[in-house]
Image (tube, grey):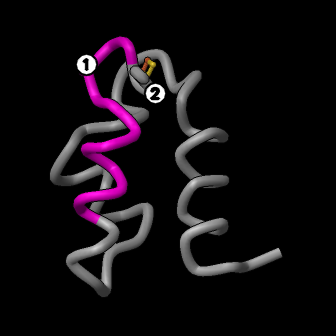
Amino acid sequence: MYICLCQGVTDRDITDLLQQGGVGMRQLRQQLKVGSQCGRCTCTVRQMVNSFYQIA
Ligand code: FES
């Protein structure tokens, strides 16, 4: 499923990067460019990061 339509980034792309370890919002922004245009995906990406690291 596409999470960032502007950059064509899927939930799988994000999960794959998170599974490499030591990856947070900054790295996702730098490497996948999520949130770099309209910004609508930022909240969803942040929720994915928090969920991955089980941050409430
Ligand atoms: Fe991600 Fe627009 S949907 S920057």
Amino acid tagged 2 = Ile
Amino acid tagged 1 = Gly
Q: Secondary structure at mark 2?
A: strand
Chain-order first, disc 2 or disc 1? 2
Residue 20 included in the magenta stretch of the image = no
- Residue wearing tag 2: 3
Q: Secondary structure at mark 1?
A: loop
Q: Most extreme residue toward the left, as rendered?
A: 31
The residue closer to the viewer here, 5 or 29, is: 5
Question: Distance of mark 2 from mark 1, alpha carbons?
Answer: 8 Å
Asked whether mark 1 and ligand 1 are closer than 8 Å, the reply comes as no
Residue depicted at x 38% and y 13%: 5
Residue 5 vertical placement versus 50 (above, below): above
Residue 12 included in the magenta stretch of the image = yes
Residue depicted at x 83% and y 75%: 56
Q: Circles 2 and 1: CB distance less than 8 Å?
A: no
User: Could you say which quadrant of the image residue 27 lies in?
Assistant: bottom left
Asked whether mark 2 and ligand 1 are closer than 8 Å, the reply comes as yes
Point out residue 51 in the picture as x, y percentages from the top left corner: 65, 66
Q: Which quarter of the rendered picture does the N terminus lie within?
A: top left
The residue closer to the viewer here, 32 or 38, is: 32
53 to the left or right of 28 = right
Residues in magenta, as a range: 5-17
Residue 17 vertical placement versus 14 (above, below): below
Residue 25 vertical placement versus 37 (above, below): below
Residue depicted at x 33% and y 50%: 14
Quadrant of ligand 1 in image: top left
**Disc number placed over residue 8 in the picture, else none:** 1
**Disc number placed over residue 38 in the picture, else none:** none
Point out residue 47 in the picture as x, y percentages from the top left corner: 66, 53
